[in-house]
Amino acid sequence: MAVSDIVPSMRYWVSLSIAAGLLTTVALSSDSRVNLPFKDLNGNKVKVTDLRGKPVVLNFWATWCVPCRAEMPIFVEAAKEYESRGVAFVGASLDEKQTRPKIPDFVGEFKIGFPIWVGASTMDLDDLRLGQALPATAFLDRDGRIVARVLGQITKDELYERLDWLTGQRKEAPELLVKHIATK
């Protein structure tokens, strides 16, 4: 066998190895479980992993975010319907120290009955591949893996499609990444 016969073969295997490595990296990053630490409104430490065993809707928002205010009634309505089906809803606030005092009024205004956590940051959004703009929503399966994302203001139909899919009422997977805002 000549050296010229071996070189193309080696290129093929090197390319194949690199592709396999990239696929593994993508699979691991999409399969990674969410374990972000936050605090509840009473200052207690909480983690997303505390909700393992349930599908989770993790919505990132802030009191100053106009689209967040527009979509919050949809989450409140859905939580009333789907919490009895085992779905956990969490609102993770990106409010900083100056605007955190406004959170209780926000919760009261929208009659939010699900947990509100504080201490979220744009780094958390990046870690979860949610961009850096608000609002952003991640849908987690019972094992704590992100299975769908909506970047920007979610519609009622988009929320309910994903909830029905997470609870097994819908077999066909919805679009797993919806972008209503430009990302880098």
Image (cartoon, rainbow, N blue to C red):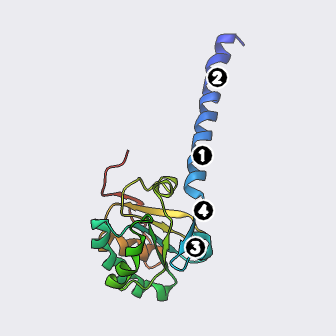
Task: Note whether 118 is above or below 179 in the view shown.
Answer: below
Residue that numbered label 1 is attached to: 25
Earlier-in-chain disc, 2 versus 4: 2
Residue 90 appears in the rendering: yes
Q: Earlier in the sequence, mark 4 or mark 3?
A: 4
* Depicted 105 relative to depicted 70: above or below: below
Q: Are marks 2 and 3 in contact (CB under 8 Å)?
A: no
Q: Which mark, residue 142? A: 3
Front: mark 2 or 3: 3
Q: Residue at x 42, y 70 (%)?
A: 100
The amino acid at mark 1 is Thr
Q: Residue at x 36, y 72 (%)?
A: 159
Determine the residue positioned at 60% across, 46% down. Answer: 25
The answer to the question of whether label 2 and label 4 lie on touching residues, with beta carbons closer than 8 A, is no
First reached walking from the N terminus: tag 1 or tag 3: 1
40 with respect to 111 (left or right) = right
Indicate which disc residue 33 carries.
4
Kindly report the distance in space between the C-alpha atoms of the residues bearing marks 1 and 3: 22 Å
Q: Secondary structure at mark 2?
A: helix
- Residue underneath mark 2: 9
Give percent across and percent down for residue 91.
Answer: 44, 73
Q: Mark 2 or 3 closer to N-term? A: 2
Q: CA distance from mark 4 to mark 1?
A: 14 Å
